[in-house]
Image (cartoon, helix red, strand yellow):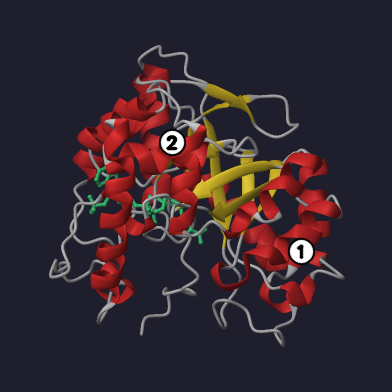
Amino acid sequence: MKYRPFGKHGFDCSEIGFGAWAIGGGWGAQADTDSLAALNRALDLGCNFIDTAAGYGNGRSEKLVARVLRERAAAGKKDKVFVATKTPPGPGLWPPSPYCQADERYSEAYVRANVAERCAYLGTDRLDLLQLHTWTRAWNRNPTPFKLLRELQREGKIGLIGVSTPEHDQNSVIDLMRGGWVDAVQVIYNLFEQEPAAELLDVAKECGVGIIVRVVFDEGVLTGKFKADTRFPSGDFRSVYFAGDRLGRAVQRSEAIRLDLASTGLTMAQGALKFVLAHPAVSTVIPGIRNVAQAEANCGACDLPDLTPAVLLRLRRHNWRRAFWYAGK
Ligand SMILES: NC(=O)c1ccc[n+]([C@@H]2O[C@H](COP(=O)([O-])OP(=O)(O)OC[C@H]3O[C@@H](n4cnc5c(N)ncnc54)[C@H](OP(=O)(O)O)[C@@H]3O)[C@@H](O)[C@H]2O)c1
C-alpha cells in the first residue's frame, strides 16, 4: 500500500480506501460475514481510510465498521484507521432543489442529533470526518450548515468537515473550497467522468482540500465484467442505474477502454484505479468492496507501476458527457 497526504490536514491516507456502501445494503444480498472479512483483509493490507454513511443500510455499514475496529483493538492490533461518514439532509428532495432552504434541510437540531447518532453507531465521541451527503449551489452564498459544522468542530465532536458532491452539479463545491468551508470533498472521478480535471481537482490542490474519489468503477461496469445483457438481482440498485439501454452503452464504451489498456498488462479494475491515482490532487480512491477477493484486488492495485503519460493521454478520450443516472430512466 502507498500513502498520500490528506490535503493539508497532517495525516497520510492509503491510496486505496474502503467504500462501505454495499456492505450496508442496496446491492442485493450481502452477508455480514463477507463484509467483516473484507474490512479485516483491507485493513491488514494497509488500507487506513474507510468511507461510510448514515444511509448505508440505516447504520448497518457504520456498525460493521465499528465492530471491526473494536475487535481489532481488542486483539491488540495497532491500526490507525480514519473513518469518514455522512449526514444526509433531512426529509425532502434528493438532490435538494434550488428552492430548498439550507436551515430546513440541515437544521441545527437535526444535524446535532444526527452527529450524535453517527458517533453512537461508530462507537466514538469524535468523528474523524463528517461529510454532508449532498448539497446545492443555492446555498453557497450563505452556507449555514458549514458554519454549524465548524462549531461542532470547535466543540471537538468532529475532526474534519467535508461534502459529497451532488452528482448533477459537482462543480457547485468549488466555491466552498475557495471560501475555506470544507476540509475534504468526495467526488465522482473515473474514466467516464473526467470533468473534475477541468477545475475542481486543481482548486482542491490549491486549497489543501483532501480529495476522496468515489465510484471509480462506475458502479462496476469499468471493471469490464458486465455484458450488455447482464441482469442484476432484485434489491441491487443497479437494476435502476443501468436500466434500459444504459448498460449496453456503458459496456460498449468500456470495451474500448479495455483495448487502450491492453498494452499495460493491467486488468480493467487496476487500470481504472491507476487512472484516478494519476491525478496529484487525489488523496484516496474508495472502491466499493464487498468481499475478500475485492479487498485484495483493489488494495493490491496501488503497488503496480503507474500508467505512462502516453497511456494516460489515450485514456482521456473516454470522458463521456452523459449526465447522471441515479434517478433512473
Ligand atoms: N453520494 C455519495 O456520497 C456516494 C455515492 C456513491 C458511492 N459513495 C461512496 O463511494 C464508494 C464507492 O462507490 P460505489 O461502491 O458506489 O461504486 P464503485 O466503487 O464504482 O463500484 C463498486 C462495486 O464494484 C464491484 N467491485 C469492486 N471491486 C471489484 C473488482 N476488483 N473487480 C470487479 N468488481 C469489483 C463490487 O460490486 P459487485 O461485486 O456486486 O459487482 C462493488 O460493490 C461507496 O462504497 C461509498 O462509500 C458515495
Q: Can residue 289 be seen in this view?
A: no
Q: Where in the figure is residue 243, as x and y percent of width and height?
A: 27, 78
- Could you say which disc has been placed on residue 11 in the image? none
Q: What residue type is labelled 2?
A: Lys
Q: Nearer the viewer, residue 235 or 154?
A: 235
> Which quadrant is the N terminus positioned in?
top left
Q: Where in the figure is residue 207, as x and y percent of width and height?
A: 80, 42
Could you say which quadrant of the image residue 252 lies in?
A: bottom left
Left or right, 210 with reference to 191: right
Pointer 1: residues within 10 angstroms few (<14), some, or many (20+)?
many
Q: In this view, does 127 lie above or below 144?
A: above
Q: Which of 189 and 37 is in front in this view?
A: 189
Considering every residue shown, the one lying at the far bottom of the view is 99
Pointer 2: residues within 10 angstroms few (<14), some, or many (20+)?
many
Cα distance, mark 1 to mark 2?
A: 34 Å
Q: Where in the figure is residue 251, as x and y percent of width and height?
A: 25, 63
Tag 1 residue:
145
Label 1 sits on a secondary structure element that is: helix
Tag 2 residue:
274
Q: Which of 55 and 328 is in front in this view?
A: 328
Left or right, 107 with reference to 44: right
Q: What residue type is labelled 1?
A: Pro
Residue at the image position 22 percent from the left and 69 percent from the top: 235
Left or right, 307 with reference to 82: left
Q: Total label count?
A: 2
